[in-house]
Structure formats: C-alpha cells, structure tokens
Amino acid sequence: MSRTCEICGKRPRTGYKISHAHNKTKKRWYPNIQEVKATQNGQTRRIKVCTSCLKAGKVVK
C-alpha cells in the first residue's frame, strides 16, 4: 500500500529519533492518509487523501 496522497503527493518523511544521550536511530513520519470516496472526472472512486487536503476542501466527496 502506498502511503502517498493522490492530491498533493505528500509522502513519508525520514529523519532521526535522538535520545537524551544523543543516540540516533532512523525514524519515519507518516502522513495521515484516509481512503475516501471522491468524484474525479465525473466518476466516483476511492482515493487516498491526506487530512490536510480534506480539510482544505481540495476533494469533492
């Protein structure tokens, strides 16, 4: 399953989790992706959209 928003293309980000002792371990931050029924080109289909696009009104349900 791809964790990518089909509207804005938002993807998981990578970085380090840094402890108090400054030990670094790899970490990933995932976008909040929801699967919604939306209308695209006159057809209703399920798309994966981040919640920031839903809140901004970029998706017509």
Image: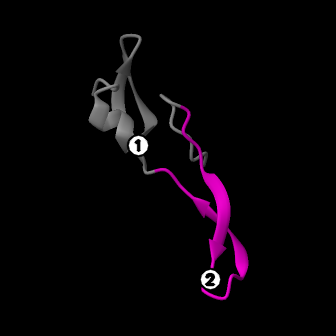
Q: Residue furthest front?
A: 21
The label number, if any, that marks residue 35 in the structure image: 1
Few, some or many C-alpha atoms within 10 Å of disc 2 (few <14, some 14-19, many ≥20)?
few
Q: Say which amino acid is labelled 2.
A: Ser
Disc with the residue nearer the chain's start (1 vs 2): 2
Q: Residue at x 34, y 25 (%)?
A: 58
Viewer-nearest of discs 1 and 2: 2
Q: Nearer the viewer, residue 52 or 15?
A: 15
**Does 32 sit left or right of 13 as displayed?**
left
Q: Is residue 34 above or below residue 60?
A: below
As shown in the figure, which amino acid type bears the numbered disc 1?
Glu
Spot occupied by residue 46 in the image (x, y as percentages of width and height)? 42, 33
Q: Quadrant of residue 61?
A: top left
Task: Tell me the magenta residue range.
Answer: 9-31
Mark 1 element type:
strand
For residue 31, side relative to residue 34 (left or right): right
User: Is 45 drawn above or below residue 5 in the view shown?
Assistant: above
Asked if residue 25 lies left or right of residue 8, the reply is right
Position of residue 34 measured from the top left corner of the image (x, y, whole percent): 40, 46
Q: Position of residue 56 (x, y in %)?
A: 30, 31
Which residue corresponds to mark 2?
19
